[in-house]
Image: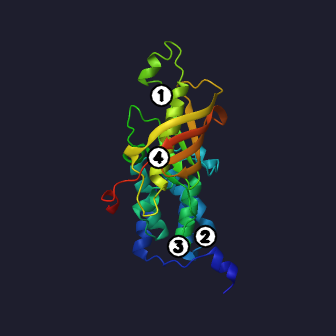
Amino acid sequence: MNSSLEIDSVSVAALTDEERGDLENSLKRCSEETRFAAFEFRETGRLSLLPPIILGIIERFLEPEIRPKLKEGDGSLKLIDDLGIDSLTMMEIVVLVEETLDLSIDNEELRQLRTLDDVREFLDAKIRNVPPPQKNKYFGVEAISAAIPHHIPFLFLSEVELSSDEAIGTYPISGLEEFLKGHFPENPVFPASIMLEALGQLAVFFLVSTEKSETGAKVDPTKILFTGCEAVRCQRFCVPGETLTLTIKPKSIRHPIAKFEGKVSVQGENAAWAEDITVTFDWREAVDNLA
């Protein structure tokens, strides 16, 4: 067989008459283009048909005013923030994708899918039966608050993207923060000291999520202490309605001291940064590490 055909197509099970009828019924609210691509894929296994199938199925579950965004073809669109896809809607999409493409998707595999490109790349790998590309890990506010001792109303991370050499967090300034009533009345400005606190929280999350001792012990989040912050600069006001993007990178981590550099920005514009954020840490007790 021609090698290009092996790359461009996969083997798929032929539809029985009953399965065809069921799939026609499931896809009846999708566009004609999506239905055509779906049945063509089930006959030929052509991978080039995946994008219109995936986008068509997602479009079927979007609100009418959101659908034009999908037509733009921007792969960086976020499923939750930009397209308004909640966890229940995501499950409905997955069920229809499984039926249409004749594959099975584990719920755990869905947790790290954040953008349209993530979905496309994941499903392409799934269909080819190859490992999906390695992605940074994402954590929502529930996972963050479960990992570190900080909690609402003094948690200033709403989402974290984690890799082996940096962590990127976000925090939308709602304007409802209690301290903004006094900082300042009639002119709320997010305090620079809280920005540094948010960078510290991000450093704590990085430590507890990535570091282990030589014996495999994990960092104890209750034994991390903020000890210093040097070479701090602030460049702009941050106000309600804006979203802080926080970035920390480890400079050195050697028990019991970890040093990070951190930056806060808003839409790519620098707001504040610190060249040295220092914390001390310790490991969990051995009994905790048996879990």
Disc 1 marks which residue? Answer: 174
- How far across and how far down the image is residue 56, in percent? 54, 56
Foreground tag (2 vs 1): 1
Structural distance between the alpha carbons of marks 2 and 1? 43 Å
Disc 2 marks which residue? Answer: 47
Which of the marked residues, 1 or 3, is nearer the chain's N terminus? 3
Which of the marked residues, 2 or 4, is nearer the chain's N terminus? 2
Foreground tag (1 vs 3): 1
Hey, what amino acid is under mark 2?
Leu
Hey, what amino acid is under mark 3?
Arg
Disc 3 marks which residue? Answer: 42
Label 3 SS: helix
What numbered label is drawn on residue 205? 4
Which of the marked residues, 1 or 4, is nearer the chain's N terminus? 1
What numbered label is drawn on residue 233? none
Label 1 SS: loop
Tell me, yes or no, if residue 81 can be seen here.
no
